[in-house]
Image: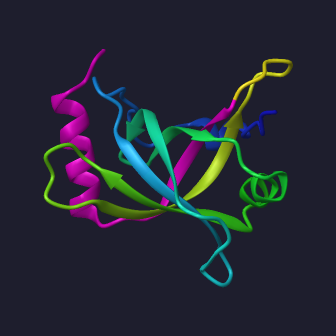
Amino acid sequence: MRKKPDLESERRRYIRLRPKEPISVRFKVIEESRKRKVAAADRAKTRSVSAGGMFLEIPLLEPKMLEGLLRGTHILSLEIDIPNAPHSIKALARVIWVEGEKGVKSDRYGVGLSFLGIREDDRDKIMNYVIDTYSG
């Protein structure tokens, strides 16, 4: 179950790095047109991060929610917890693609996200943390 991006969207503007320790992220699925929450908050962990987005491992979602995320009618509201930071970083993100292996039973998806709304100083905090803790 993978929505394949076209070649244009596959080209990255920013380098994507894997932090030594995954970053904890709280997320809510919201309906983009009304900015209304459609699912309770849940937790996820990063696999990799860039200044333009991140790759998260999230728990399974109801099929209608996943469909909304893939079609772009739903987006994610994120609270990103950088270790030792005084507060969470808030951002909005769109799901670009979903990774799930066919025939493999799992309770999680991998999702590639592109930030829609994030303050530049918060984007810098994320990247500084990732660069400082880069695991290669």
Quarter in which the C terminus is drawn: top left
Q: Which residue is located at x 81 percent, y 55 percent? A: 67
Q: Quadrant of residue 30?
A: bottom right
Question: Residue 85 location, x and y as percent?
Answer: 15, 52
Question: Residue 126 location, x and y as percent?
Answer: 26, 47
Q: Is residue 17 above or below residue 97?
A: above
Q: Quadrant of residue 64?
A: bottom right
User: Of 51 and 73, which appears nearest the observer?
Assistant: 73
Please indicate whether residue 69 sits to the left or right of residue 118 in the image.
right
Q: Is residue 120 above or below residue 125?
A: below
Which residue extends farthest top?
A: 136
Q: Is residue 119 above or below residue 7?
A: below
Q: Which residue is located at x 28 percent, y 23 percent? A: 20
Question: Residue 128 location, x and y as percent?
Answer: 18, 41
User: Of 14 and 116, which appears nearest the observer?
Assistant: 116
Please indicate whether residue 68 sits to the left or right of residue 28 in the image.
right
Q: Is residue 26 above or below residue 56?
A: below
Q: Which residue is located at x 26 percent, y 43 percent? A: 127
Quarter in which the N terminus is drawn: top right
Q: Which residue is located at x 76 percent, y 36 percent? A: 4
Question: Residue 52 location, x and y as percent?
Answer: 43, 49
The residue stretch that appears in magenta? 107-136
- Asked if residue 129 is among those painted magenta in the image, a careful observer would answer yes
User: Of 123 and 60, which appears nearest the observer?
Assistant: 60
